[in-house]
Image (tube, helix red, strand yellow):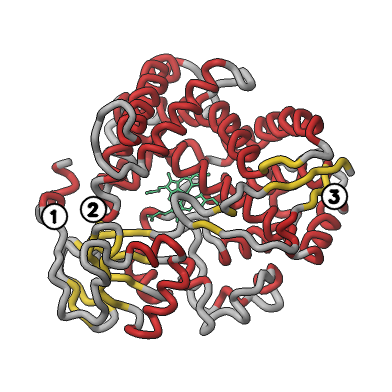
Amino acid sequence: MAKTIAPYGDYIHQPNCTNLDHLPGDYGLPLIGHTVGYLKDPLVWAQKRYKQYGPLQRIATTGLRGVLALGPDLAQQVMLDMDRNFSSKMGFHDRVQKFFEGSLIMEDFEHHRHQRRIVQTAFKNDALQHYTKEINRIYDRALDEWDADVGQTIPFFMYIKELLLIVAAEIFAGETEYKGERVRYLNQAFLDATAGLMYILPWNIPGFTYHTGMKGKRNLQNFFRPMIDQKRKGDGMDMLSFFSREKDENGEYFTAEEVTNQAIFLMFAAHDTTTAAITHTIYYLARNPQVKEKLYREVDSLDLDGLLWEDQDKLPYMQMVFNEVQRIRPSVPSVPRRTIRECEMAGYKVPANTMVFTLPRFTHWMEEYWTNPHIFDPERFSPQRAEHKKHPFQFHPFGGGAHKCIGMHFSQMEYKNFLFKFIKRFDFESRHAKQDVWMQTFPLPKPSDDMPIVITRR
Ligand code: HEM
């Protein structure tokens, strides 16, 4: 912790700045501020506020006062953070801290860079090649089971969520027994911990969400920590093995606590994000038959059973579909930070210790940068149109700067390999081809009814 404080002042013990009256904007209703509009549809809410107050404005939401920073210029300033003004630790502080203390997203500056080394080691080329093969095997096994559901309605979101948890147990922790007892234990602990994040009252009493979350966190720690010694001695190719064997600049292993913290957060960062990306893809394919047909044709044109790591660039249209899904419904709705000192943003002086909320989806829908942004149109990412190239931060689903997503390539491999195998085997129909559904953003972005589809064998 001392390393975090060193050259930056003691920003981690300061309360949030709440006097932002000199900035444009308003704090909304007493007590609840703008929480209702923000949670209901952050895009509609932000678009209205942008028209009224411009890119930087004071707000109050979910019990916090801060500034809303809209558009690519401010996203770039906050995420690249060239002047080291913004703390990720304090942006996520309190709620996330309770569950993911010591994880990458909860660290800043030099200490963050030091810890990132632990995780980085699991994303080298040979490791990614290995994961790709293993993931294909798991997908084959799971899709064989899905065969039994042909002709029936399945809640697609629940199915893909379960499947990606099985993938996580094997790839992250080396648990190879498909749906085995340890896999189920790990997955339940993870579900409890993430459910806990949504607590309303931080009461560690049975029956309260917070208590469930804390139990999940403990179970995750009890799962990962005892394996670390063994993993150090072995030559395992799972991510926990890579983390455990990594050494710091002095040639010392990172502590078991550090490794455990990173492993727990990795599951969190990886899982719901990729689940949302695949679920939204199924939704937009159902609603856009011409896109679906083109994607099916592209997959059919490749005479392969599955994609190896080297094959990832062989599906350019699928890449455009992925990008368009992330543009229109990014898996990470908000990237928060807190200022560590007074700084200038959009011509205003923003005080030290001010919460800063960026909203990638707002930027992804700005008419200044995108043609008909409300329309699902993958080809806007084609080399001919390249609409995404007007500003380096007009499209930033994976963030940017020091905290940029470490799993960016891994997640796209997981996504493409799933869709490739799913499309080779199944066609599907959904009532959402014609019928609207409420697309929720919190606690995670997805169609609110879990995206029911009927699958048929091709
Ligand atoms: C579609 C899938 C994904 C999306 C859209 C996504 C998006 C993001 C974003 C926006 C951030 C930056 C957050 C911030 O700056 O506050 C981030 C960070 C992170 N992501 Fe991802 N992510 C995805 C999948 C994954 C996967 C599969 C993994 C791991 C296998 C992963 C691991 C991480 C980690 C460890 C961080 C923290 C990095 C740091 O703080 O240094 N993500 N992700």
Residue at 33 percent across and 29 percent down: it is: 207
How far apart marks 2 and 3 lie (CA) works out to: 47 Å
Q: Amino acid at mark 2?
A: Met
**Relative to 155, 70 lies left or right:** left
Position above or below: 332 against 147: below
Dot 3 corresponds to which residue? 302
For label 3, being within 8 Å of ligand 1 is answered no
Q: Amino acid at mark 3?
A: Leu
Q: Position of residue 118 (x, y in %)?
A: 38, 36
How far apart marks 2 and 1 lie (CA) works out to: 8 Å
Dot 2 corresponds to which residue? 90
Mark 1 lies on a secondary structure that is helix
Label 2 neighbourhood size at 10 Å, few (<14), some (14-19), many (20+)? Answer: many
**Relative to 410, 143 lies left or right:** right
Nearer to us in this view, 183 or 216: 216
Label 1 neighbourhood size at 10 Å, few (<14), some (14-19), many (20+)? Answer: some
Dot 1 corresponds to which residue? 11
Q: Position of residue 212 (x, y in %)?
A: 36, 30
How far apart marks 1 and 3 lie (CA) works out to: 54 Å
**Relative to 403, 138 lies left or right:** right
Q: Earlier in the sequence, mark 2 or mark 1?
A: 1
Mark 3 lies on a secondary structure that is loop
Position above or below: 49 against 127: below
Mark 2 and 3 residues: CB-CB less than 8 Å, in contact?
no
Mark 2 and 1 residues: CB-CB less than 8 Å, in contact?
yes
